[in-house]
Structure formats: structure tokens, C-alpha cells
Image: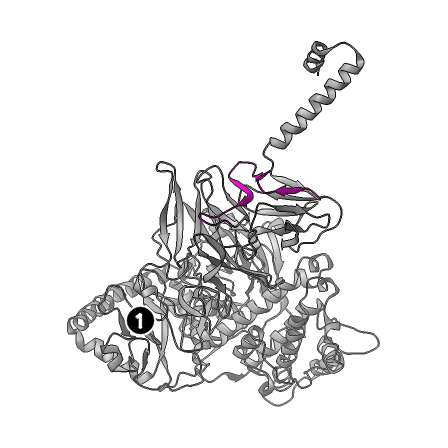
């Protein structure tokens, strides 16, 4: 200011002269600001062709009017400024070119970007709407042109890509608005209007990227497998960029980010149909091809037809999958493989029961997976569950894991012919459905083709047997060292009366010393106590290696004892599933019986369901995920585990929650294993928890897999309502929770069962379907209840459901009456143990 005044004094001393010169300097300042590069325009401001442009803050991108190469037409676009000046990455009025230099971009007071030209009031519009508050359009350093309404973005150019895919962009579908973001080529280097080529992230079936030429599907980038896109060459983690795939209830898209700010990279769909990853090389001042999405001949869509497989390392590249033969041999001999292959032997569709003639699966290793437009997927199934799902669906032709990381997870089923499969240097395998007789033929062929392998296998088996004998001898010596249990001899001596506990089952678990356990728990310090069950108290502990553990110690007053302790070890030692709590080891020292589990930081489910502050923590998506997880865990126990198990004590307090609120079934002290199809048994001693036990078990002592289904149904209703079945009351009625849910269902108002804390987060269709399934599970007669396999399918599908019948224990009185019955027949003792 002082400098300005000193300058003013040079022009005159009168006040009038100074005012004139102040005005002169203000004009100069405004002119200089107009010449300064800005990255924003405000409401009712405009950018005129040839007069001004917007430049992003870091001067990476510039927005303005331009003419592409030899064209005389004018377009509003965004191009690089700092590097490769003039390389266009986005065009607004692609289909409405301006024929002269009268173009103007303006931001209206309602937040709408409009391009006008001469007498045409509307050449192009963003169709974005805000309110008349603080509106600004800004060009970001990412190349994104954004309209802000205060701090809320109401429009962005990244939602309407052209031929260029920039870091941070999304290619995919917004499931809320229906907006499809895809790449479309220019018509020619001189014409940015929409060309014949499109790259679309297709969301039919399991999402994948498809490359179209008009109406012809010419290629595809396979689905995301957790590491990369199936069929795109990867070796190790790319040092330049990282790709990602996002799928949730709101949107499905692919995106990528650059790892270094000094690197410039873009993906371009060229006017002649090539999809190139281009990287700027400063040394030569030019773009170089970093990668090409289409690698070779095998990337042409379905080159080898249905059930054909392409390999670039073979000549000719096409062959039929094992168990298949050319549909048209003459065409194949003429190198026309489009008709594909057919099965040599027809399938025998079974029910997944393991019949000898039932279809099986042939594994094809290291492939780009087939076209997924006619597919079904589930992100939480295991590969074993996936195989069963495929076997039980006669339309299923193959399956694989969705995510290949950490041994694989998720399930992808194909429900049509397998198209566009190729051999690939990747870690993904697929399992092709095949007739049992054809599988036997393949195995016989493999066996006969290499007799040396058979000899080698015999040698290896013999060597393994010898090693196992040594291992058994070592195990026998180790068993003798196990401490005695007070009053009952050592573990091995106890087992002479009941051979169900084998030595090799103990070897699968670590035996901890009492000293290790007491040190981990601070000598069973009261402050470390985290729970109390029918077995006894549970303590938190920390091992020497830093692992947190849960220590379950048999109480002297417990109604459970060595039998339940041994039963839990036998059952859970051989069970491995993400929804079952993991048993790490045990301690048996004199009269101490202790089980060591993985630690669950969020305790048990009942702490969240029935505790008012805790109930606010679990929203509906979390509860729905817990229902799914419990169902998958029970299905594993009933059908897929090495020892098929009936849990017999499923309840909220026996469902533990890990750090991510994933459910894990615990407490197998009352579990019973069964063999083959003998899934029903009878007992004189009825054990379990009031409110979760089905009538056939409570009255007659008969239990089966349908007993667990009943308990699961009760648990579902408790998760949805946040109320205990046994403690529920509603008005003047004596209904328990099951009866209340049944009356609401009959009245068509099942949504009234939903906990008030879930109203803001719930998906009504999911809630109603879950209540319906729960009522199917708690029906009075076991034969009416679905299996857990059917329950899992009903939870993940959207088809019609059977009509439920009246539930068991309709009222609280009916349950109380059952408790008072001392005996129903001579073989039944209906004594229930509350735990």
C-alpha cells in the first residue's frame, strides 16, 4: 500500500488526481487477474471460445474450446497442459459440434453447465441441478470437471467418460441411479463423436468387462479374482498402478490409481478399437504403450466356441476340453472352431447325494475363466459348498472360486455353455461338470498312458506308510507322558472303555501345560474373566507369542464333566470352517480340564441382541450377515464336515463374534456326531436350553439335524426382533416370540417384528424373507422343516418360498407344560438342563 501511495505521488498531489490513478491501478489489477489462469467459474460466469480457459491447480489439465487435428469444428474439452499439450481426454459436446468460434460455456445459477453458440441457446447441457446458494465449477488436477453446491458435488465429468479412462475414474454401473459409465471410441482421429467401439463393465451374472464392435462382442476382460482381472497378464504387483474392483448394494465398478505422482498414465479406447494403457515418457516427450488389453489371437471372443479351450502355445490354438469332442469335425479340420464342442457322454443329474452314477467334476488348471453373463455367485461360500451347489443344480456346468487369494473363497457357478475359455499363466482353476463314466475313462486313460507314475505312487505310498508307523510309535510314547486325571487314570486308560477318542485326534491339537495356562490368564485372575457357561468360567489370556486366547475351565460345580470335555475335543478338533470357533489346544492336569480357543474380541451375540446399548451397535446388514454366517456354519456341521455333527445347543450365547462381527459357532460339549444317512437318534437324557429345543426332542428325546434347524429358526427371530424367545411378552397374549411372529405373519404385518433400532438400516424385502424362512424352520413337525442346505439357498436367492405351518411351542404355556412332564414313555426322561 505504501508503495502504491508513493507511486501515486509521482502522478500528482491533488486528491482528484490520486482518485483517478487509484481507479487506473484497479483496472490494471482486474485486467491482470483476468489474464491469470483460474481453475473455477462461479454461477452466471462464462468461458468464451478463444478468450479464456480453466487450468487445474497443478497445471496438469486445461479446459476450453478446441478443434481436433484437421477438423474445423469446435468442441469443449479437457486436455493435458503440463505434458503432451493438446492430448484430449474428455469432450463435452461430442455429438453437437460448433461450426464457428462463438461457443461459450456458462454455469447457471441452478448449477447447470450449458454450452451456447451464436443463435443456438443450448448446444449441450450437464443437466445438473443445485440451488441458488454457493455454486462453482472446478477443474481438478485429476482431470475431473466438477460442479459443487457448497461442499456437495452435484455433477462430474468422470461420470461421463469418452475414450479415455483416467486414474480415479470408475467404469461400471451406479445401481441407485442406473448410470452406466463406459468407454466409447472416437469415430476418427478428427471426429470425437461416438464411434463403433465400446468397453462396458457388464453386470449381468458376475461382472466382467466386455469389448463391443457395434452389436458384435469381440472380446472381454475376465472377472476380478481378488488379485487381477482373469485373462489379463500379471506377474507380480505392478509398480506403476493398482487396479481395484468394487461391488456393493450401490454400485459396481472397476478403477485404478497411480502409485507415483510423477507418473502419467491413461487407458485409451482408440478409434480403431485397440484398448491401450499409455504412459508418458519424459525423455522422449511421447506416449508409449505400457500394455495392450488384447494380447493375442486367443483374446478374440469365443474363438473356440462352446466347451472349446484356446492356447496360444498350441497349433492350432483350439482344442476341446477333456470329455468333449468337436461338434462339427469338418469345420474344425478347416480351422473354423466357432461351432465348439459337445459332450461325449450325457450328464446324469442327481441331487448331490453321492450316488455312484452321479456327475463329477474335472479340474482344468490355470485358465482365464469362461464368460460369466450366465452365471450365479455367492461371495461367502467355500469351494466345497460351491461344488455341492453346482451338483444340485442340473443347469450348472462348472464352478470356481471368486477370490483366488489365500486358498480361494466365494463361489461362481456357470449355468450355460462355457464360452471363451483359454489356458493362461494364472493361479485360477475351474471345475467342469462331467458324467461319472466319462471321468472314469479319463482317469483310466491317464493311468494307462504313464505306468511309471503308478510305480512311483506305489513307492511313495510305501514310504509314507513306513513314516506313519514311525509317527504312530512316536505318538504312543507321547501319550504315555500325558498327566493323570484325578480319580480316572490317564487319558489313554480312560479311552480303553470308549474308543471314540483316538490318539491321532489328540495329536491334531496342542497340549498346553497348566503352568502355561495359568501364566497366560494371570492365574485365572477375576479381571480376566470374560464369561460363564454350563462348562464353567471363560478367561481371556495371552500366550508368550502374543496370541490372545479364550480359556474355558471346567467348574467343579458344573453338570458337565469329562465326557463333555472329551466330546468337545473330538468334535471340534476335526472341524475347520470360517463360521466355527477354532480350538487351539487343551490342558488335562489332575482334576483340571481346560480348553483353549481363539479369542473373540466382540464376545457373544446375546451381548448385542438383548442388551439395549449393545443392540444399537448391530445394524441390519450386520445382522443379516450374521444370519448367513450361522447358516453356513450349521450346513458345514450337517453336511460338509469330516464328522457330521448335530450341535444340540444352538443359541445366541453360543454364537461368538470376531473383530469384524463375523459369527462363529462355539460350545460343542453337547454335540453328537452321526454316520452316513443315519441322521436321527434318541436319548434318555434331554439336554439343552429352554426356548431353543424342538418338541420332538423335549417330549420324546428324539433329535436330528432338524433339531438344529429349529434352534436356528428361533435364533433368526431373536436376531430380527432383539427379543429373547423365552422372555417375550406382547400385550395380554401369552404368546412367546414364535407365536407372536406367527400371528404377525398371518395378519400380513411381519415387519412389526423388526427391532426399532433397525428401522433406519433395514432392507424390508430381506427382513420379510428372513422372518418367512425362520417360520419355516420352527414348524412343529421335523419333516416340515427345511434342511440347512435349503435354508442357505433360500437366504441367497429371491425365488418363491413355501407357506409355513403353525410353529411349535405356540404359547409360553405350551412350553411350560412340556417342562413339567416327568416322562412320556418308558425310554424318555424329559429333564432339561438350563445352561
Q: Vertical placement of 318 versus 129: above or below?
A: below
Considering every residue shown, the one lying at the far right of the view is 732
Quarter of the figure that contains the N terminus: top right
Q: Vertical placement of 386 versus 619: above or below?
A: below
Residue 317 is situated, as x and y percent measured from the top left of the image, at: 26, 68
Q: How would you rate the neighbour count of disc 1 (Cα within 10 Å): few for under 14, some for 14-19, many for 20 or more?
A: many
Question: Does any portion of residue 27 appear in the rendered image?
Answer: yes
Q: Secondary structure at mark 1?
A: strand
Magenta-colored span? 44-72
Q: Nearer the viewer, residue 117 or 498?
A: 117
Question: Does any portion of residue 643 appear in the rendered image?
Answer: no
Residue at 53% over, 69% down? 668
- Please name the residue that numbered disc 1 is placed on: 309
Residue at 32% over, 74% down? 308
Residue 636 is situated, as x and y percent measured from the top left of the image, at: 49, 72
Residue 387 is situated, as x and y percent measured from the top left of the image, at: 42, 74
- Position of 360 with respect to 741 (left or right) is left
Q: Nearer the viewer, residue 714 or 217?
A: 217
**Residue 47 belongs to the span the image colors magenta:** yes
Q: Nearer the viewer, residue 87 or 694?
A: 87
Quarter of the figure that contains the C terminus: bottom right
Amino acid at each position: 500500500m505504501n508503495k502504491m501511495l508513493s507511486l501515486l505521488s509521482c502522478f500528482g498531489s491533488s486528491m482528484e488526481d490520486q482518485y483517478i490513478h487509484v481507479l487506473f491501478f484497479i483496472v490494471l489489477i482486474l485486467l491482470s487477474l483476468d489474464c491469470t489462469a483460474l481453475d473455477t467459474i462461479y454461477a452466471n460466469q462464462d468461458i468464451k471460445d478463444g478468450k479464456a480457459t480453466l487450468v487445474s491447480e497443478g497445471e496438469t489439465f486445461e479446459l476450453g474450446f478446441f478443434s481436433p487435428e484437421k477438423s474445423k469444428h469446435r468442441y469443449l474439452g479437457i486436455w493435458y497442459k503440463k505434458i503432451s499439450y493438446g492430448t484430449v481426454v474428455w469432450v463435452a459436446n461430442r455429438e453437437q459440434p460448433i461450426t464457428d468460434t462463438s461457443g461459450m460455456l456458462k454455469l447457471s445459477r441452478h448449477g447447470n453447465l450449458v454450452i451456447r453458440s451464436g443463435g443456438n441457446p443450448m448446444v449441450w447441457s450437464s443437466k445438473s441441478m443445485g440451488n441458488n446458494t454457493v455454486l462453482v465449477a472446478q477443474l481438478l488436477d485429476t482431470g475431473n470437471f466438477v460442479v459443487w453446491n457448497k461442499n456437495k458435488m452435484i455433477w462430474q465429468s468422470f461420470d461421463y467418460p469418452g475414450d479415455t479412462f483416467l486414474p480415479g475414474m470408475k467404469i461400471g454401473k451406479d445401481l441407485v441411479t442406473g448410470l452406466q459409465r463406459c468407454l466409447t471410441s472416437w469415430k476418427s482421429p478428427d471426429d470425437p463423436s461416438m464411434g463403433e467401439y465400446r468397453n462396458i463393465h457388464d453386470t449381468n451374472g458376475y461382472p466382467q468387462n466386455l469389448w463391443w464392435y457395434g452389436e458384435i462382442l469381440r472380446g472381454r476382460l475376465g472377472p476380478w479374482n481378488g488379485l487381477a482381472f482373469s485373462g489379463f497378464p500379471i506377474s507380480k504387483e505392478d509398480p506403476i498402478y493398482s487396479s481395484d474392483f468394487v461391488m456393493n448394494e450401490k454400485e459396481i465398478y472397476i478403477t485404478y490409481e497411480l502409485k507415483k505422482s510423477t507418473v502419467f498414465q491413461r487407458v485409451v479406447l482408440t478409434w480403431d478399437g485397440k484398448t491401450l494403457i499409455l504412459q508418458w515418457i519424459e525423455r522422449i516427450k511421447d506416449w508409449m504403450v505400457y500394455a495392450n488389453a488384447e494380447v493375442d489371437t486367443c483374446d478374440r471372443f469365443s474363438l473356440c466356441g462352446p466347451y472349446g479351450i484356446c492356447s496360444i502355445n498350441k497349433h492350432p490354438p483350439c482344442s476341446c476340453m477333456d470329455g468333449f469332442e468337436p461338434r462339427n469335425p469338418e469345420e474344425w479340420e478347416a480351422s473354423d472352431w466357432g461351432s465348439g464342442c459337445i459332450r461325449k457322454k450325457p450328464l446324469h443329474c442327481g441331487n448331490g447325494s453321492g450316488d455312484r452314477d452321479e456327475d463329477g467334476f474335472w479340474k482344468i488348471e490355470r485358465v482365464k475363466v469362461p464368460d460369466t453373463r450366465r452365471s450365479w455367485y455367492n461371495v461367502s461360500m467355500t469351494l466345497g459348498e460351491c461344488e455341492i451347489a453346482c451338483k444340485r443344480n442340473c443347469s450348472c456346468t462348472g464352478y470356481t472360486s471368486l477370490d483366488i487369494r489365500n486358498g480361494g473363497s466365494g463361489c461362481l457357478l456357470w449355468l450355460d455353455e462355457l464360452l471363451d475359455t483359454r489356458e493362461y499363466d494364472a493361479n485360477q482353476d475351474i471345475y467342469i461338470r462331467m458324467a461319472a463314466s466319462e471321468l472314469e475313462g479319463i482317469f483310466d486313460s491317464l493311468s494307462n498312458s504313464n505306468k511309471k507314475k503308478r510305480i512311483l505312487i506305489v513307492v511313495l505310498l510305501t514310504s509314507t506308510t513306513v513314516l506313519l508307523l514311525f509317527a504312530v510309535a512316536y505318538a504312543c510314547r507321547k501319550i504315555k507322558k500325558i498327566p493323570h486325571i484325578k480319580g480316572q487314570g490317564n487319558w489313554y486308560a480312560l479311552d480303553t472303555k470308549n474308543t471314540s477318542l483316538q490318539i491321532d485326534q489328540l495329536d491334531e491339537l496342542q497340549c498346553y501345560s497348566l503352568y502355561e495356562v495359568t501364566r497366560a490368564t494371570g492365574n485365572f485372575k477375576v479381571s480376566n474373566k470374560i464369561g460363564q457357561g454350563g462348562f464353567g468360567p471363560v478367561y481371556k489370556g495371552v500366550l508368550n507369542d502374543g496370541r490372545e486366547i479364550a480359556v474355558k475351565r471346567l467348574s467343579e460345580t458344573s453338570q458337565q464333566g469329562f465326557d463333555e470335555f472329551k466330546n468337545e475335543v473330538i468334535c471340534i478338533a476335526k472341524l475347520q470352517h470360517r463360521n466355527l470357533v477354532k480350538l487351539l489346544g487343551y490342558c488335562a492336569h489332575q482334576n483340571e480340564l481346560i480348553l483353549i480357543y481363539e479369542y473373540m474380541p466382540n464376545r457373544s451375540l446375546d451381548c448385542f441382541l438383548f442388551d439395549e446399548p449393545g443392540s444399537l451397535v448391530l445394524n441390519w446388514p450386520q445382522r443379516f450377515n450374521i444370519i448367513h454366517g450361522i447358516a453356513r456354519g450349521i450346513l458345514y456341521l450337517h453336511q460338509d464336515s469330516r464328522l457330521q455333527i448335530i450341535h444340540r445347543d444352538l443359541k445366541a450365547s453360543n454364537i461368538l463374534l470376531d473383530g469384524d462381527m463375523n459369527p462363529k459357532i462355539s460350545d460343542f460339549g453337547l454335540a453328537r456326531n452321526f454316520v452316513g444317512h443315519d441322521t436321527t437318534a434318541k436319548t434318555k437324557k434331554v439336554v439343552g436350553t429352554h426356548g431353543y429345543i424342538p418338541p420332538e426332542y423335549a417330549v420324546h428325546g428324539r433329535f436330528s439335524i432338524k433339531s438344529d434347524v429349529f434352534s436356528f429358526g428361533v435364533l433368526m427371530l431373536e436376531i430380527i426382533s432383539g427379543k429373547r424367545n423365552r422372555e417375550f411378552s406382547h400385550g395380554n397374549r401369552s404368546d412367546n416370540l414364535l407365536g407372536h411372529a406367527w400371528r404377525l405373519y398371518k395378519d400380513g404385518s411381519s415387519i412389526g417384528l423388526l427391532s426399532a433400532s433397525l428401522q433406519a438400516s433395514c432392507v424390508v424385502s430381506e427382513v420379510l424373507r428372513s422372518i418367512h424362512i425362520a417360520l419355516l424352520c420352527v414348524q412343529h413337525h421335523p419333516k416340515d422343516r427345511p434342511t440347512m442346505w435349503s435354508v442357505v439357498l433360500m437366504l441367497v436367492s429371491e425365488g418363491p418360498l413355501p407357506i409355513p405351518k403353525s410353529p411349535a411351542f405356540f404359547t409360553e404355556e405350551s412350553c411350560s407344560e412340556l417342562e413339567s412332564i416327568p416322562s412320556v414313555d418308558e425310554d424318555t426322561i424329559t429333564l432339561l438342563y438350563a445352561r
